[in-house]
Image (cartoon, rainbow, N blue to C red):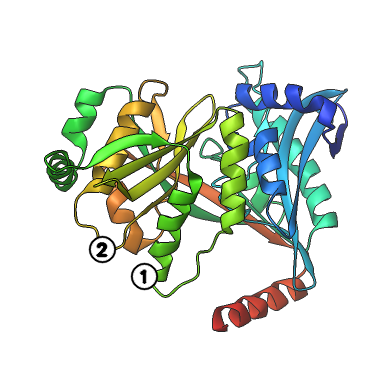
Amino acid sequence: MTELEIREVKESEFQAWDKFIEDSGQGTLFSASSWMEVLSSYPGGKSRLMGIFSSGQLVSGILLYERKKAFFRVMAYPPLTPFTTPVFKDSQTSRFSKIESSQKKIIQCLDSYLRKNYSYIAMQLAPSIRDTRPFSWLGWRASVHYTYEVDLSNMAELWKKIDKDAKYEINKAKGSDIKIAEGEDIDKLLALYEKTFLKQNAKPPLNKGFIRKAFKILKVKNKCRLYFATEKNNEISGAMVVWDNKRAYYLLAASEPDTKTGANYLLLWHIIEDMSKKFSSMDLVGANIPNIIKFKREFATDLVHYFVVEKYSSFFVKIIEKIYRKLRRAQ
C-alpha cells in the first residue's frame, strides 16, 4: 500500500462515501452522511467524515463526533449511536496476510491523526472487526461489549425459538383490544420516552429535540419508521426502527410504565415480522445492562460481541477524566 492521506470528506464526495459505506463489511447507517447530519443536530457537538486515501482512492474512513468535556476535546460515544467504527474497503485479494497488513497500516494512520487532535478517544467497533491487536499495539485499551441480534430469515423457526414468556405476552395482547400500526408523530414516542424516566425519577439521557430532528432527517432518507401499540386510541408503547442496506436496528423504544397488557411484546413481534420482509437480521441494539436486557433476550437468536477501544493522550488526562466522571456521577 502506498502512502496514506487522511482528510475530511467534502460534501461533493458524500454520494461516493455512502456507496463506500454500503459496500464495506463494516459499513452501517451510523457511518453514513445522513447520520453525520443527525449528529450535527445535537447541541454541543460536531460531526465530520474523515476519509483515508491511498493514491487518491478511498480505502478507509470514520465518522467522528467531537465535543468539549470540561477542558478536554473528546471523540467518544455520540448519542443514539451503537457503532463508531473505522470502515475498510473490501479487499480484492484473498491473501489474509495482505488484508491484515493493510488494515494495520490504516489503523496506524488513524491513530496518528486522532491522538494529535483529541485528549480522549473511544470507538465502538463493528462486530465484524474481530482483531483489536493493531489498536493494542498502539496503546489502546480494548473491552468486550454485547448486542442481541434476531435472525429474520425464517419466521416460522423464529417463532419456535423465542422465549415462551414472550409468546404468552404476544398472545395475551392479541386477545385484547391492542392495535399495532405505523405512525408519523414522533412527539407521541417522545411522551412515552419521557414517562419511562420520570417513573424512575430520572432525566431522559437524550435531548428530545435531537430525537425529533433525527427522525425527520432519516424519514426523508427512507431510513426510519415509527410503530405504536394503542389501547382505546391511546398510545401505550412505541418504537423507532432504522435501517441500512444490511440490517434493521431497534433503536429507541418506550412504553407506559405501568402497562401490563403485553403491548410492547406484540409491538416488537410486529416490527420483527415487518422487517423480515426486507432484511435477514435485526440488531436489538445493546445487551450490556443487566436490568434491561430481559425483554430483548426473549426475542434474540444470537448474542453478538463487539469491541470498544479507547485511548487517552496522556496518563495525566486519564486521571483528570476519571475525576471528572466521579464528579458528574455525584451531581
Question: Mark 2 and mark 1 in contact (Cβ < 8 Å)?
Answer: yes
Residue nearest the observer in this picture, 291 or 212: 212
Task: Tell me residue 148's x, y (percent).
Answer: 38, 44
Q: CA distance from mark 1 to mark 2?
A: 9 Å
Q: Residue at x 74, y 23 (%)?
A: 15
Which residue bears the numbered disc 2? 258
Provide residue 158's location: percent of width, then percent of height. 23, 30
Amino acid type shown at disc 2: Asp
User: Residue 294: horizontal and vertical position, in percent?
Assistant: 28, 54
Q: Residues within 10 Å of mark 2 (few under 14, many from 20)?
A: few
Does 74 sit above or below residue 97?
below
Q: Nearer the viewer, residue 257 or 320?
A: 257
Residue shown at 20% from the left, 24% from the top: 156
Query: Please, is residue 116 above or below residue 248 in the view?
Result: below
Residue 32: tell me if it is visible.
Answer: no
Instruction: Give residue 126's quadrant in the image.
Output: top right
What residue is shown with label 1? 199
Numbered label attached to residue 26 = none
